[in-house]
Amino acid sequence: MKSEKTRSNSKNLNLEDIARKAGVSRSTVSRVINNETYVSPRTRERVMAVVEKEGYAPNPAARSLVTRRTRIIGVVIPTSIQVMFEDSAYFPALLQGVVDVTNARDYATLLWWGSSEADEQTLYSRIMQQNQLMDGLILASIRTNDSLITRLMRMKVPFVTVERPTQFESKISYVTVDNVQAATHAVKYLVKLGRRRIATITGSLNNPDGYDRLIGYRQALREAGLYLDETMEIDGEFRYQTAYTVMKELLPKQPDAIFAGSDMMALGAMKAIQEAGLRVPEDIAVIGFDDVPLAAQSDPALTTVNLPVHERGYVAAAMLLDMIEGKNTEVRQVLLPTELIVRESCGTHLQPVAK
Amino acid sequence: MKSEKTRSNSKNLNLEDIARKAGVSRSTVSRVINNETYVSPRTRERVMAVVEKEGYAPNPAARSLVTRRTRIIGVVIPTSIQVMFEDSAYFPALLQGVVDVTNARDYATLLWWGSSEADEQTLYSRIMQQNQLMDGLILASIRTNDSLITRLMRMKVPFVTVERPTQFESKISYVTVDNVQAATHAVKYLVKLGRRRIATITGSLNNPDGYDRLIGYRQALREAGLYLDETMEIDGEFRYQTAYTVMKELLPKQPDAIFAGSDMMALGAMKAIQEAGLRVPEDIAVIGFDDVPLAAQSDPALTTVNLPVHERGYVAAAMLLDMIEGKNTEVRQVLLPTELIVRESCGTHLQPVAK
DNA sequence: CCTGCGTCTGGGAGCGCTCTCATAGCAACT
DNA sequence: AGTTGCTATGAGAGCGCTCCCAGACGCAGG
């Protein structure tokens, strides 16, 4: 009995194998699978039949070795999710927006997500090491003055951020919401309802979203001719627990309204207010930011600013793919519209103080 | 003036370039960057100096073309997140567990996440097309009788599921929680508190988690000698809104306890109960499943079953990488422990009915 | 008949790595 | 001096694709 090696039946065929089976050359098969012109209909049909029968798929490594394209984009989220946005659905919604685009345009999405343990710089080193693996990057929650940004610019890796950059702003493509304008609008709404002692619990100020919302708050007070009191601005780190704690410190100052930089912080603040025996909105109005699903279900239901998070990911991904494919090479900055969602936590129905 | 082409200064160097600069051969540089033996310390040092100075990183496509390894794993989540788990943090936590492992072991994570529009089969076709791009897969929320599973098995692509498979169970490696046992334990707890008319709002029954929890519920009633009433088992689809609706239909049957297949459903049920003027837990006890962050903040705080979601992803990823690296080739099944978290929604403090 | 010009096909080079094999150098034994 | 064994290095082939170029073929016009 001849010793015949039993080869793995799952062995992947290559172009040459398909060419042989179809009685054509490697080049012709390549033309067919890349849907190029200059192939006769008869040949094309014959090749396709073999390709489908054998379940052939081109080897992506070989392909991208020569094309220098991978059809993969990376999404970078440095902080472990719990730290940054707790139980809100921000990153899932953002990611959903991204994959809706990459799915439709036949790209794959590589997730660069920080671990609780590992530090950001390690993650960034790995990303730079692997930069040839990706055609471009979407950056979320990244400090713009980080060396990653400069390295990416130097290596000419296409990227889009989903926050306003704090550096190189004119050279970086980004998509965000007009935080300043939205915050101003929200605070003016409080003013219009008759509130005068409006405090704010801010998100982390090294995050552009958090920072810009504070700027918007100040601008509204200024335009309303109200006194700016720095002790009425407290950092809540985007966290429920922190907001709960700082709200208690805020109570002795007797604010009549709280503008929170996120819904989770608004809910934390509301809990502290209610535990102190005060009523929302009668004693203190609370307004949030984000419009998380939970906001509609709290008691009282939270008045907040709705952000198009899904769209943020969607637009960023679309912009990135356009850059990669050379459809739109110039730098673009997109500000998505926000919407004030009026519910109960500011007492829209009862107007506590006459204007 | 000589016309001199300005070449991109971001051109990636290759092994040969580094070799020339270090005065050694391609092979030697390869040995150094792969940390192989048989390189003299002097040479290694000299090469490393050049590598670092030039910021050289090997081309992943070229490398995996010959090694047939990519150091990339895929995570497959077919349904768009909103459909399946609403605002709970299930998938983020699962993903966090996965990336904690891949980060530590220097793998990259490719996200195959369904779009709302695109159907699952399209996604699965793309995955199969790209199977050479990944060393293995983690499958979440996939119907085990799907053709994807059989194709993966035929192509000998290593994979691990994070639910109990409904088919080929003995041939598939998976990691999940002991849903049956956990549900039995939870329902027995209700029995011990004196509840006798215990209804259940189940998750989707084509999901193994949802199905097994129902099985556990029935088993507990049987063991307690209680009557099994099929009209007391209603599908809540894992959704807050659906649970809210079906709970209203359940009220006329006068249950004294609800075992919900998820926390979100428990909260939906609680809302319906309270809106009907009944009290939780005095009139109806409610017990959930998942221990989402929100469960601790509801009123009353929800008694529920804590699942190690992060660990589920963590263990699955670790198992997959072991399979890929040939450290552990045999099929393994892991059941992670659960924990009953007693809060207020079952009235632990007040024991409404004497035993 | 040749030439020109489209359409279609095949062969060869080369992308940047790894891996096998050959070989040089050197020390320690016969 | 020859042999052995180990360390250290280099050369060559080849992974599976794309892309460039050469050439075959058919058909028009001179």
Image: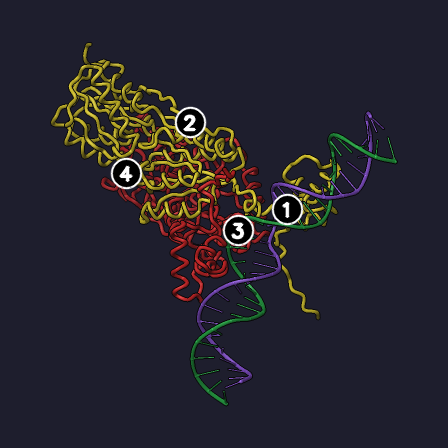
Chain colours: A red, B yellow, C purple, D green
Neighbourhood count class around disc 2 (C-alpha, 10 Å): few under 14, some 14–19, many 20 upward = some
Task: Quickly name the residue at label 2.
Answer: B332
Mark 1 and mark 2 residues within 8 Å of each other at the beta carbon: no
Which residue occupies the foreground of this view, A89 or A181? A89
| Chain ID of residue with mark 3 | A
Which residue occupies the foreground of this view, B169 or B275? B169
Task: Quickly name the residue at label 3.
Answer: A62
- Which element is circle 2 on? loop
Task: Quickly name the residue at label 4.
Answer: A296
Q: Which mark is residue A127?
A: none
Taking the image as drawn, is residue B333 in sight? yes
What's the distance in space between the residues labelled 1 and 4, CA to CA? 52 Å
Mark 4 and mark 3 residues within 8 Å of each other at the beta carbon: no
Image height of B194 relative to A82, above or below: above
Which residue occupies the foreground of this view, B321 or B77? B321
Image height of B348 relative to A151, above or below: above
| Chain ID of residue with mark 4 | A
Kind of residue indicated by mark 4? Ala
What's the distance in space between the residues labelled 2 and 4, CA to CA? 43 Å
Are labels 1 and 2 assigned to the same chain? yes
Kind of residue indicated by mark 3? Ala
